[in-house]
Image (cartoon, rainbow, N blue to C red):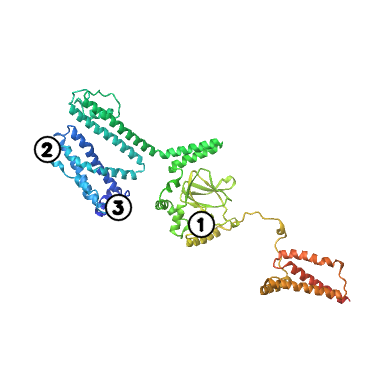
Amino acid sequence: MIFKIRDRPLSDFLQPMFGVHNLNTPHPFADRRYVTWLAVVAVAFNYNIWFIPVRLVFPYHNAANNPYWLFFDALADLVNVIDIMVWQPRLQFVKGGDIVVRDLRRCTDLVSLIPFDVLGVYYGLSSVFRLNRIIRIEYFFEFSDRLESIMAKAYIWRVIRTTGYLLYALHINACLFYVASLYQGLSTTEWVYNGEGSAYLRCYYYAVRSLINIGGLPVPQTVFEITFQLCNFFVGVFVFSSLIGQMRDVIGAATAGETYFRASMDGCVSYMNTNSIPKFVQNRVRTWYNYTWAAQGMLDESELLDKMPLVMRMAIAVDINLATFQKIALFQGCDQQMLVDMLLRLKSIVYLPGDFVVKKGDIGKEMYVIKSGAVQVVGGPDNSIVFVTLKAGCVFGEISLLQSAKDGGNRRTANVKAHGFANLFVLEKKDLFDILVHYPESQKVLARKGKNLMKAKGPVAAKGVTDKRGLSLFGPKPPTPKMLRAFGQGGLLGKLKVKYGSTGHRQLTMVMIEFQMGIHQLIIAKTRPVHPKGVHLRTCIFLCVTYLSSLHSNIHPLILSDFIITICIIIHYLFGLNNE
């Protein structure tokens, strides 16, 4: 049932008394003023339910006690009147998803306030006229549910409530035993109450021994006594078996988490013993189990959060980490909803003292937010130099989320280890990229800020191994000669290739070959003998030009060799004619 306080005057009056500031919340457990008032109503109800049977059965109505009974009766009735007339009309209830103001319990409340006590003026003071007050029992269960929901350790209230049920069952049995003793006659047999001492205490003592089946009771003599005792035994077995089972469930629920923790730890230790894991590793594993359980009361927080709806998980994540993420320079200016989505992807990891969170040279795939504890950035020989200590709320490793593997940019540049026990939240790069797909503007902001942070940090040197084989031994490429550039890609050949495409390039090659053959035929026509080694001239020049072309790949080796041979033939022909 969801309620809401509608009128402010009473709220403002009670606020200083109870110190509650959330006055208009529709949440059923957030306004503790109502729970506190229900506690007062529950006390008034318990006064009626405990003392009405006692006053009805035992001779406690006399001239000395009646003023006290009248005072407490009036006080309990005043609490009920204030609740029905002031508190209940100020509540709004949810029925079928709609908020209604009408209290569905108004009829029963009015019946419980009918003042049958005035009949005691004519028939004498008796608690039988107050039996209608017990109708308000639903308020006691409402108080019990709300108190259980707001308590950090609800099992304490469950144990107290179950113990109260047990004591009340004994209380009712004591009253019934006194009625049975009056019916048989006081002191008529050994089984009934003999009329000595405190009647209530002696009857309660009998109820305890009878219902719990302790034994040692006087033997019943009459049929009525035997029947009453047998009913006591049967009811006692049923009631106490139910209460003991309920108590077992309460205690089991209170220790369920610890039982799961012990079972998990025992299973892990058994696995390590089976595989002969070294003792120092086993001790570290035990230390991790004990600290994780002591620090957060569970081994994996995600198991609990995954059972909650998205709205609840988002509220918890925002309350814990949103303020920390808003202080990170890398994420300032990004969409707030993107930050919330990032918070939902965080994973909690516990590091033991001395554990390395990141190592220098490792691939950076995560960023870390310190939830509790501290970490140290270390270096030097044996990592003995502490550069800085980061404490709760600090962030490190965020730049590696935006750096790529090109040129080793995503490598860790320092060693970070836990200083004592450290509980860290981890955000993986893959999760960040999955989120940025839906936030293109934030992606641009992060890219720009990432570049600025990397420039401020300085260029990261590549850690690859230089290849000393092949053409790298010859050093840098020399510049292309001007004469070759005139025929190269930027010269005549390039212009022809741009104008005529690959077909023009091939036609130019054929023209060069025909020009060469024509010059050669001209030499033969002049009967100039060819040098005996001239056959190898083209091969040697082609091999040399192939190497030069490898340095300047913009010139085809065949074209270059043909061009050089043609020039040589022309020079040979001109000098040969002059010699003649």
Of labels 2 and 1, the one closer to you: 2
Q: Secondary structure at mark 2?
A: helix
Indicate the amino acid at tag 1: Phe
Q: Could you tell me which residue is drawn at 43 percent across and 44 percent down?
A: 296
User: Looking at the rendered structure, which numbered label has been put on residue 433?
Assistant: 1
Picture coordinates of residue 305, whole percent (x, y):
43, 48
Indicate the amino acid at tag 2: Tyr
Q: Secondary structure at mark 1?
A: helix
CA neighbours of label 3 inside 10 A, class few (<14), some (14 to 19), many (20+):
some
Q: Could you tell me which residue is drawn at 14 percent across and 33 percent down?
A: 62
Examine the rendering and report whether any part of residue 267 can be seen: yes
Q: Tell me if 516 is positioned left or right of 232 in this view.
A: right
- Marks 2 and 1 sit apart, C-alpha to C-alpha, by 84 Å
Disc 3 designates what residue?
94
CA neighbours of label 2 inside 10 A, class few (<14), some (14 to 19), many (20+):
few
Picture coordinates of residue 302, whole percent (x, y):
45, 47
Q: Earlier in the sequence, mark 1 or mark 3?
A: 3
Please name whichever residue, 107 or 76, is drawn nearer the observer in this view of the structure: 107
Of labels 1 and 3, the one closer to you: 3
Which quadrant of the structure image shows residue 558? bottom right
- Marks 3 and 2 sit apart, C-alpha to C-alpha, by 45 Å
Indicate the amino acid at tag 3: Val
| Number of residue marks | 3
Disc 2 designates what residue?
123
CA neighbours of label 1 inside 10 A, class few (<14), some (14 to 19), many (20+):
some
Q: Could you tell me which residue is drawn at 23 percent across and 37 percent down?
A: 50
User: Is the residue 369 above or below the residue 551 in the image?
Assistant: above
